Amino acid sequence: EVQLVESGGGLVQPGGSLRLSCAGSGFSFSNYWIHWVRQVPGKGLAWVSRINGDASSIIYADSVKGRFTISRDNAKNTVYLQMHSLRAEDTAVYYCARDSKVYGGVDYWGQGTLLTVSS
Amino acid sequence: DIVMTQTPLSSPVTLGQPASISCRSSQSLVHSDGNTYLSWLQQRPGQPPRLLIYKISNRFSGVPDRFSGSGAGTDFTLKISRVEPEDVGNYYCVQATQSPRTFGQGTKLEIK
């Protein structure tokens, strides 16, 4: 069974840093791109970042470029999102999601982890 | 970036009746490989999104056949033939033809 489990969310002050983790299981982790997508509570979905299987290709949304860094450790079946210079507008549930070449998009999502940026 | 526009933003429907959601993209979603990477997601209250339909019209594993997708180019539609109570939630279209991935604003399906 494909599973994605996010962790690391919490309350951070503006300007602070935090690292989110996304642990995958039930599939050949290194063969898949992984995305981070966020959702402000009660609002829609917004794509944040994507990393390919061997971390040779990485892209970011303009809103987080220069502040967030995505990385992966395939030996641990885990993708990370390191976030710096956090702002109130970064407050959201952060989901990691697996991308599938077969389905031409994201096929499985994690349960999400909530980041709150507030003083 | 490709802009995805959904209508309506809210859809009150009667149980057992059909529902339809439209999604329009600001440019064609036909990829250079000939595929159209348009998916539909369902998000039930308090749950993460779930893939319903991929590449316009293909139902993902376990998705009931009352869900169907259609369209081409820049105009796409998700239809539910007979709405069930468990269909309540938000529905999003998303394109994967061009980076970055972009989502529609979401359509809230609720029971009258």
Image (cartoon, rainbow, N blue to C red):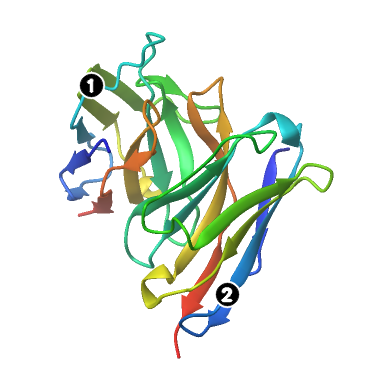
Above or below: residue A104 compared with residue B6? above
Q: Amino acid at mark 2?
A: Ser
Q: Quadrant of the C terminus of chain A?
A: bottom left
Q: Residues within 10 Å of mark 2 (few under 14, many from 20)?
A: some
- Tell me, yes or no, if residue A9 can be seen here: no
Residue type at tag 1: Ser
- The answer to which of A88 and A94 lies nearer the viewer is A88
> Could you tell whether B18 is left or right of B38 in the image?
left
Residue A91 occupies quadrant: bottom left
A23 left or right, relative to A41: right
Q: Nearer the viewer, residue A107 or A38?
A: A38
Give the x, y percent position of residue B70. Answer: 27, 20
x and y, in percent, of residue B16 in the image = 27, 38
Q: Classify mark 1: helix, strand or loop.
A: loop
Label total for image: 2
Using the image as rendered, state which of residue A42 and residue A56 is in the foreground.
A56
Quadrant for the N terminus of chain A, please: top right
Tag 2 and tag 1, C-beta contact below 8 Å: no
Res B37 label: none
For disc 2, the chain is A
| Residue at mark 1 | B28
Element type at mark 2: loop
The residue sitting at the left extreme is: B8
- In the displayed structure image, the side of residue A26 where residue A9 appears, left or right: left
Tell me the residue at 48%/73% (across/down).
A85
Question: What residue is shown at x 21% (from left), y 46% (from top)?
Answer: B14
Q: Which residue is mark 2?
A: A17
Residue B71 occupies quadrant:
top left
Q: Indicate the position of residue A108 as horizontal and vertical percent values.
A: 57, 40
Query: Label 1 lies in what chain?
Result: B
CA gap, disc 2 to disc 1? 39 Å
